[in-house]
Image (spheres, rainbow, N blue to C red):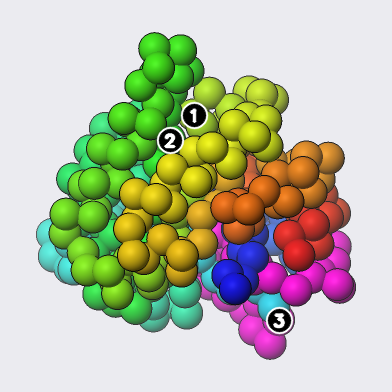
Amino acid sequence: MRTPLVAANWKMNGSREFVDGFFSALDLEGTTGEVVVCPPFPYLSLVAGRVVDSPVALGAQNLSHEASGAFTGEVSATMLRDLDAGYVIVGHSERRSLFGESSELVASKFIAAQSAGLVPILCVGETLQEREQGCALDTIAAQLQAVLDRVSTDELKRAVVAYEPVWAIGTGKTATPEQAQEVHGFIRERLGSAGAAVRILYGGSVKSGNATALFSQADIDGALVGGASLDAEEFGKICRAAQ
């Protein structure tokens, strides 16, 4: 059985005061799945100190595909591991759309993450235009294939996939549980023999009010939570819903 996973993506939000307040207010009593918090780079060490001896794992929001060198402003996988990060998000829709990351670059970041012992959370998903044109699954298949072409089945089993309907991120819109399940089922099928083992998260405006209905679907193993993860009480409720 796949262990549920809920990951918080704080994006470019936070401060020292926010980190202290968040963890002071976070209540995970009754949570049986895994919980990951992905803060901005400047707060990785601060969050690392707060999650010691807790059920929360540390994650990062991005990484370089390069191991080291003259790459000003970049952060390598080994640096993240040195700060005790266990997970890292790769290919988030905002990285793809705002910063021009191609699926090939995302695949390289996926490999770099695993090479350093990090678990990549691979994000895939379609825009509203792609959904309306009926090519959503083709888009997702292509994003997955860039990784599938370069990793083994065993390597794939050591990863997490997050389905992000781009049209439902930060818009207040959410795919219905049935729509989300359809895509999650498609992703699991595309993963081939690794599919049964890989956790697939939903990442489109998850809130405590819709979490239970989403998590009740057969192929939804948890969530990648954006805006709602900035509210410790709300995030705790989502984590408890992932049973």
Q: Nearer the viewer, residue 208 or 194?
A: 194
Q: Which residue is mark 1?
A: 166
Helix, strand or loop under label 2: loop
Location of residue 126 (image quadrant): top left
| Viewer can see residue 88 | no
Task: Give residue 116's position: percent from left, percent from top.
Answer: 29, 76
Residues marked 1 and 2 touching at CB (< 8 Å):
yes
Q: Which quadrant would residue 232 be assigned to in this image?
A: bottom right
**Residue 243, position as x, y percentages in the image:** 76, 65
Q: Earlier in the sequence, mark 3 or mark 1?
A: 3
Is 212 left or right of 82, judged from the image as shown? right
Q: Inspect the image, locate mark 3, and give the three-letter code of the amino acid beneath it.
A: Ser
* Nearer to us: label 2 or label 3: 2
- Image: magenta residue range: 25-54
Task: Give the residue number, with chain letter if any, for mark 3.
Answer: 54
> Residue placed farthest to the left in the image?
70
Residue at image position (66%, 24%) is 173
Give how far apart the Cα atoms at labels 3 and 1 are. Answer: 32 Å
Secondary structure state at the residue bearing disc 1? helix
Dot in front, 3 or 1? 1
Q: Which residue is mark 2?
A: 125
Q: Bin the neighbour count of mark 3 within 10 Å (Cα to Cα): few under 14, some 14-19, many 20 and up.
A: few
Answer with left or right where residue 75 lies relative to residue 93. left
Q: Position of residue 199 (x, y in %)?
A: 51, 62
Compared across the picture, whether 206 is left or right of 123 comes to right
Mark 1 and mark 2 lie on one chain; the one further toward the N terminus is 2
Amino acid marked by disc 1: Val
